[in-house]
Image: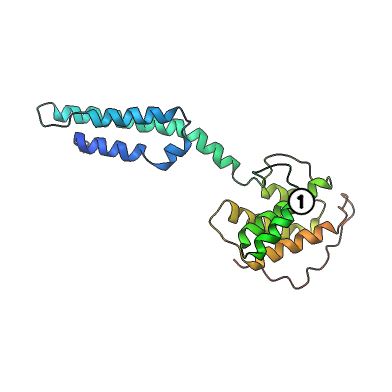
Amino acid sequence: MAAEPPVLPGSEEARRWAQEELAKAEYRDAAPGWLDSVWADILDWLRSLDGGPGPGTSVAAAWIGVAIAVLIGAAIILARPRLNAKAKRAGEVFDADPTVGAAAYRGRAAAAAAAGDWSAAVVDCFRALVRTAEDRNVLDARPGRTADEVAHELALPFSVAALRLAAAARTFDGIRYGNETAGQADYAAIRGLDTALQSLTPASADRPVDLPADRGQPAVPR
């Protein structure tokens, strides 16, 4: 069965397609600064093309379509590495001043909680938990560590807290890198975990520890 010939857009429609495609946020956000002028030049060129009627209109439209395909392909190739790099950064616990200490994070968390901003309170409380583990040399101070890595690494010396650590990491990622919001119960759960871990001596490979009871902690809603 013969394949149907491809549908060629008119020159005006082809220009509109290209302009709409190149204006998408993913290309603008991922493009290095020097590409801004390239995008502007491409759009200016597309606007300058003559779309008037004539015997060569169909041929011109076909070449415009080819040019659009090449431009979009180039945009994807240039944008993808930066988008991938951004995706790899997702999940990092710290993305601000590395000198901020655990006490400062707890203060910020308490202030956010007092203002009813439970999402900010959860994020800063989790960061306080991680910073304390670094200060105690339970974790090495390593840039780029993710919340999941925190949960996994702290589950070794604090094995009975493994489930709570994993839940805290999921809550942190959902708020910080997803579209989730926190409630008072989320903050209470992570604050209780933070307090409990501070009172423990990290276990060696052959000596378990007991996690203090989490008194009156509400379940984390999901």
Q: Nearer the viewer, residue 85 or 136?
A: 136
Q: Residues within 10 Å of mark 1 (few under 14, many from 20)?
A: many
* Residue matched to label 1: 102
Left or right relative to 188: residue 2? left
Question: Which residue is the extreme one toward the bottom?
Answer: 216
Position of residue 119 measured from the top left corner of the image (x, y, whole percent): 61, 59
Position of residue 113 measured from the top left corner of the image (x, y, whole percent): 66, 63
Position of residue 42 measured from the top left corner of the image (x, y, whole percent): 33, 29
Is residue 2 visible from the viewing direction of this image?
A: no
Left or right relative to 173: residue 24? left
Residue displayed at 86% across by 62% down = 210
Give the amino acid type for the residue marked by disc 1 in the picture. Answer: Ala
Quadrant position of the N terminus in the picture: top left
Residue displayed at 87% across by 58% down = 209
Quarter location, residue 88:
top right
Is residue 29 visible from the viewing direction of this image?
A: yes
Quadrant position of the C terminus in the picture: bottom right
Mark 1, secondary structure of its residue: helix
Colour mode? rainbow
